[in-house]
Image (spheres, rainbow, N blue to C red):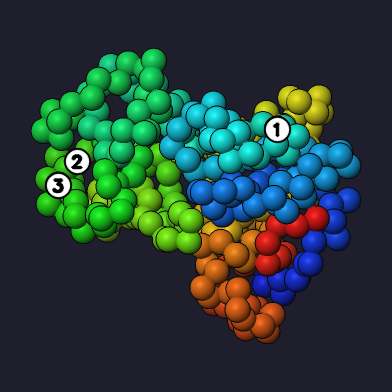
């Protein structure tokens, strides 16, 4: 565990101000590269510029789907392949956890769009009453439901001592300007009533270790910890995860905390950072070069 950071957050106007300090950038996707509807072109250009200067870019996301699904999504949003070297998802980490429970019946809580997560795995889907564990990828309907919708179900599952694997630790996400709940909000509710949760993505270490392993294999040599930065828009996952992993953290303000930060002065922003459980090393309104 890294000690809590007390140094003031450094305000940036562009990533070019610090790019020569790093060999590897672990960049969040949703909220930084796109908003769930369209790509942020300036962010894409910044990632391309990093790679042009020798910085490896691994996109690290809490999306509960295998990386190939995210590649397809990025292409649909016109995110250029030149913007990244590789992608690591919480879905990739989650599949390894499911494989450890091969053959055990599972109750999958989440929308059908997340079914690729278990494709090809021995993970028979069953009703809650028949399950040996729970796989949570999100809400069945994140437009109308909340964690409270599942209170009765969760109470029954906790009594049976079923472990929940959370494939996406994010509490909420910005979808085209609308904040919607994610699997992390369900996992938190499950923990609060005594349930046990295993988290697959940020801020937990396994997803960072997988990303670093891929980057080092591509570069052909180790990357020193002080040459790694992580960019994201969420204090609880992106910034806390980067800090715990020992990477420099860069906070994008125009993400899920936009309401608290975008229209504020830097003095007000620094006050907000000081009140959080994790503090970024750097902050930038949007990822730009």
C-beta proximity under 8 Å, tags 1 and 3: no
- Observer-side mark, 1 or 2, equals 1
SS at badge 2 = loop
User: Label 1 to label 2, Cα distance in Å?
Assistant: 44 Å
Residue under the point 67% across and 44% down: 26
- Counting residues from the N terminus, which is met first, the one under dot 1 or under dot 3? 1
Q: Position of residue 4 (x, y in %)?
A: 61, 65
Distance CA(mark 3)–CA(mark 2)? 13 Å
- Residue 167's image quarter? top left
> Label 1: few (<14), some or many (≥20) within 10 Å?
few
Which residue was labeled with disc 3? Answer: 153
Residue that label 2 marks: 161
Residue 215 horizontal/vertical position (percent): 72, 32
Q: At numbered mark 3, what does the secondary structure look like: helix, strand or loop?
A: helix
Mark closest to the chain's N terminus, 1 or 2: 1
**Badge 1 element:** helix
Residue identifier under label 1: 81
Query: 180 or 8: which is nearer to us?
Result: 180
Distance, label 1 to label 3, CA atoms, is 42 Å
Determine if residue 45 is in view: yes
Q: Quadrant of the C terminus?
A: bottom right
Q: Residue at x 83, y 45 (%)?
A: 49
- The mark lying in front, picked from 3 and 2, is 3
* Side (left or right) of 268 relative to 287: left
- Mark closest to the chain's N terminus, 3 or 2: 3
Q: Are marks 1 and 2 in contact (CB under 8 Å)?
A: no
Cβ–Cβ under 8 Å for marks 3 and 2 = no
């Amino acid at each position: 565990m890294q000690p809590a950071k007390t140094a003031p957050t450094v305000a940036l106007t562009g990533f070019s101000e610090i790019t020569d300090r790093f060999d590897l950038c672990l960049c969040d996707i949703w909220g930084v590269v796109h908003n769930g509807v369209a790509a942020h072109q300036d962010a894409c250009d910044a990632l391309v510029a990093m790679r042009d200067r020798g910085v490896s870019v691994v996109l690290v996301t809490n999306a509960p789907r295998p990386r190939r699904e995210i590649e397809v999504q990025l292409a649909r949003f016109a995110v250029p392949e030149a913007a990244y070297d590789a992608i690591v998802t919480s879905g990739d980490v989650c599949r390894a956890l499911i494989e450890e429970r091969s053959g055990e019946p599972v109750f999958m809580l989440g929308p059908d769009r997340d079914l690729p997560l278990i494709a090809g795995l021995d993970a028979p889907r069953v009703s809650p009453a028949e399950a040996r564990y729970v796989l949570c990828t999100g809400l069945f309907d994140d437009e109308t439901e909340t964690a409270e919708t599942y209170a009765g179900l969760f109470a029954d599952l906790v009594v049976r001592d079923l472990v929940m694997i959370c494939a996406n630790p994010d509490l909420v996400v910005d979808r085209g300007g609308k904040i919607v709940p994610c699997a992390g909000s369900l996992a938190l509710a499950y923990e609060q009533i005594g349930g046990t949760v295993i988290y697959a993505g940020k801020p937990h270490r396994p997803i960072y270790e997988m990303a670093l392993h891929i980057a080092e294999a591509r570069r052909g040599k180790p990357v020193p910890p002080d040459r790694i930065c992580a960019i994201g828009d969420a204090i609880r996952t992106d910034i806390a995860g980067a800090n715990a992993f020992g990477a420099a953290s860069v906070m994008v303000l125009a993400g899920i905390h936009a309401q608290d930060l975008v229209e504020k002065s830097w003095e007000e922003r620094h006050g907000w950072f000081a009140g959080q459980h994790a503090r970024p090393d750097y902050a930038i309104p949007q990822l730009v070069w």
